[in-house]
Image: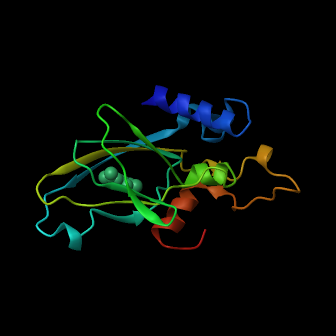
């Protein structure tokens, strides 16, 4: 997971036109945190009346997601919920809130939700890749100038989490 994370951060830095090491260095360098959450969605007799996970964006910078072969994840794209296909042996990569902030909005934190299934149990394993709580996260200085003002405030990741959990505006 750490090797994949390093590679993704390098590619995403290059995508911003920056040196490969920039995103990692702003995420605490070697201190980047990986947090795993296992979601279990038992079969539901009336799946149209329930959601597995409410629509949300992840607080992390990136989320790596693996699931069993039951579909359920949906992304909000072009004003519609779009189902994510199950792909064997694939890891899904979601952009999270910290990446949107660091990139000053060039990468968008994806709104997503999960549905439940009438017949089958669904399990997903999410690994949230996040800066340490004390890391100060804001738009990368390399991306901000007079023509491109900062679109997000700068604060520690711990402060961001506190605000998001308590529904305080960022
Ligand atoms: O189960 C899924 O596919 C998504 C779960 C999720 O969005 C989350 O745990 O943050
Ligand atoms: Fe999520």
Q: Please tell me in which quadrant of the rendered image residue 112 appears.
A: bottom left
Q: Residue at x 69, y 62 (%)?
A: 153
Residue 82 left/right relative to 15: left
The residue at the far right in this view is 146
> Where is residue 59 shown, x and y percent of the image?
49, 56
> Where is residue 26 shown, x and y percent of the image?
66, 41
> Where is residue 134 shown, x and y percent of the image?
59, 49
In the rendered image, the vertical position of residue 44 relative to residue 87, given as above or below: below
In the rendered image, the vertical position of residue 35 relative to residue 160, given as above or below: above
Q: Residue at x 32, y 37 (%)?
A: 87
> Where is residue 42 shown, x and y percent of the image?
15, 57
In the rendered image, the vertical position of residue 11 relative to residue 152, given as above or below: above
Q: Please tell me in which quadrant of the rendered image residue 51 appears.
A: bottom left
Residue 74 left/right relative to 41: right
Which quadrant would the N terminus be assigned to in this image? top left
Ligand 2: give its quadrant: bottom left
For the residue pair 157 and 38, the one nearer the viewer reads as 38
For the residue pair 109 and 48, the one nearer the viewer reads as 48
């Amino acid at each position: 997971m750490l090797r994949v994370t390093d590679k993704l951060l390098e590619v995403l830095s290059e995508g911003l036109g920056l040196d490969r090491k920039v995103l990692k260095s702003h995420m605490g360098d070697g201190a980047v945190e990986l947090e795993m959450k296992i979601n279990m969605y038992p079969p539901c007799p009336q799946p149209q009346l329930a959601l597995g996970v409410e629509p949300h964006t992840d607080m992390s910078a990136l989320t790596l997601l693996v699931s069993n072969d039951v579909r359920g994840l949906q992304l909000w794209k072009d004003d519609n919920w779009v189902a994510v296909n199950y792909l064997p042996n694939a890891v899904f990569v979601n952009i999270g809130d910290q990446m949107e902030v660091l990139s000053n909005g060039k990468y968008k934190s994806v709104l997503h939700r999960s549905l439940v299934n009438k017949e089958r149990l669904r399990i997903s394993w999410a690994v949230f890749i996040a800066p340490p709580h004390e890391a100060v996260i804001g738009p990368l200085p390399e991306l901000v100038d007079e023509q491109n003002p900062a679109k997000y405030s700068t604060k520690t990741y711990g402060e961001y989490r506190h605000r998001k959990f308590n529904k305080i505006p960022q």
